[in-house]
Amino acid sequence: MIPFWTTVLLDLAADDHAGGQAFWAAVTGYEVSAPRGEDDEFTTLVPPHGDDVLKVQRRGEGPSRLHLDLHVADPAAAADRAVLLGARIVVRHELDYVVLTSPAGIPFCFVTHTESQRPAPARWGEAASLVDQVCLDVPGSSYEAECAFWEQVTGFEGAPARLPQFRRVRGPAGQPIRFLVQRLADDGPAGAHLDLAATDRAAEVERHLALGAEVEHVDDFWTVLRDPGGLRYCVTGRDPFTGDVSA
């Protein structure tokens, strides 16, 4: 059951929620929707053009993290299949969505909402950027099994990446979020982080620093940052319009 859309949820710790939501709205250039949910815990970051790909949830407890929503026609059937592939169901909700964790422990949901138009990159003067990728960070001991799981549960095509510690999981044209799986050097917990594509990586990083981010590490191909609440993410030199790597 191939997902027809993917949404990333920024699950922000209660103390980091207000600042984190404002930061990601400024980084993307998206508007914050009216809150919803039993405790007004959910908002959507609404792009000027195209459909939603980023949402924010205020967590009741626990640190900030990410989770994925995979949009499918039948969440219950997709969840049953995912369990056969090694996932664990956390809750089947009466509102027709299912919360699960992958074999390595990465949280995700099957939902039914329909979307179709990929947002355009935001322009910042002569430069442009776009949140267009989620990187699944997996311990080496779980890496091969986790790659196989995400390829099978999504029906997307696995492919080698430029660097040996990464593997791509390629969705069909029009998918708003690219998947990358990273083999971690240690056996810490599995997780996920966002990647932004930018036409001018240095300028994009400076823009984020002015908004309150901090640089953690600079690599040849990406810069690792932390948002004001400590959530790690990367700015890359990929073309935000095509996804191509410049160098």
Image (cartoon, rainbow, N blue to C red):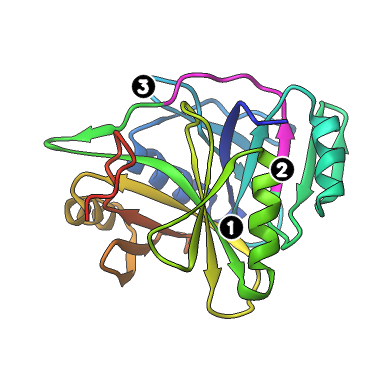
Q: Are marks 3 and 2 in contact (CB under 8 Å)?
A: no
- Mark toward the viewer: 1 or 2: 2
Please identify the quarter of the rendering in which residue 190 is found: bottom right
Which label number is shown at residue 153? 2
Mark 1 neighbour class, 10 Å CA radius: few under 14, some 14 to 19, many 20 or more = many
Q: CA distance from mark 1 to mark 3?
A: 26 Å
Residue 36 falls within the magenta-colored stretch: no
Q: Which is more N-terminal, label 2 or label 3?
A: 3
Residue 59 visible in rendering? no
Q: CA distance from mark 1 to mark 2?
A: 25 Å
Which residue is rendered at x = 68% and y = 75% of the image?
141
Query: Most extreme residue toward the bottom, as rendered?
Result: 186
Q: Secondary structure at mark 1?
A: loop
Residue 79 visible in rendering? yes
Q: What residue type is disc 3 on?
A: Pro
Q: Which stretch appears magenta? A: 108-118
Which residue is rendered at x = 66% and y = 38% of the image?
155
Q: Which residue is mark 1?
A: 64
